[in-house]
Image (cartoon, rainbow, N blue to C red):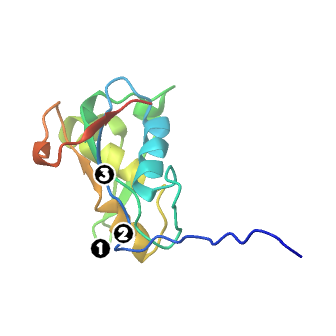
Amino acid sequence: MNTLSYKTISANKETVQKDWVVVDAQGEVLGRLASQIARLIRGKHKTNFTPHVDCGDNVIVINAEKVRLTGSKMTDKIYVRHTGYPGGQRFATPRLLLEKHPERIIEHAVKGMLPKNRLGRRLFTNLHVYVGDQHPHAAQQPTEVKF
């Protein structure tokens, strides 16, 4: 039997090509934006995607305070956290978070779409969210990405 032999190429830490990309969150819907960012961070858009390797790009998100939420999520959605002390459960709405820490809304949404393991925690460090349209990563020469 004369058939072609194709080898599956798996990426590893040394052979991965990591790029820097800029995403503008102005006017974008939070969930749709977060899923596209998670796809870029995970590396699923690359041909040599390997599930157990950090082969995604470094993503810079600007204008985090201008992200949109559809329906009545701005007031009805609730973020729950715990201080670690008895009775320390705290609640916040997206409206309150946008006033204090607008970047945390995008970070929370993207983190929920990444794997819940060591790899997911490592991938989350490739996300950089900034309020406003300035970022300190000009030296990396990031490319603009439109969704």
Q: Give whichever of 7, 119 is nearer the camera.
A: 7
Residue found 53% across the figure and 55% down from its top: 47
Q: Give the farthest residue toward the front.
A: 2
Looking at the image, is 52 positioned above or below residue 35? Answer: below
Q: Secondary structure at mark 3?
A: loop
Q: Earlier in the sequence, mark 2 or mark 3?
A: 3
Work out which quarter of the rendered image holds the N terminus and state it: bottom right
Q: Nearer the viewer, mark 1 or mark 3?
A: 3
Q: Nearer the viewer, mark 2 or mark 3?
A: 3
Q: Are marks 2 and 3 in contact (CB under 8 Å)?
A: no
Q: Which residue is mark 2?
A: 121
Q: Which residue is mark 3?
A: 19
Q: Which residue is mark 1?
A: 84
Q: Secondary structure at mark 2?
A: helix
Looking at the image, is 132 positioned above or below residue 135? Answer: above
Q: CA distance from mark 1 to mark 2?
A: 21 Å
Q: In the displayed structure, does residue 52 sit left or right of residue 108? A: right
Instruction: State which quadrant residue 147 falls in.
Output: top left
Specify the amino acid type for callout 2. Arg
* Residue 11 can be seen in this image: yes
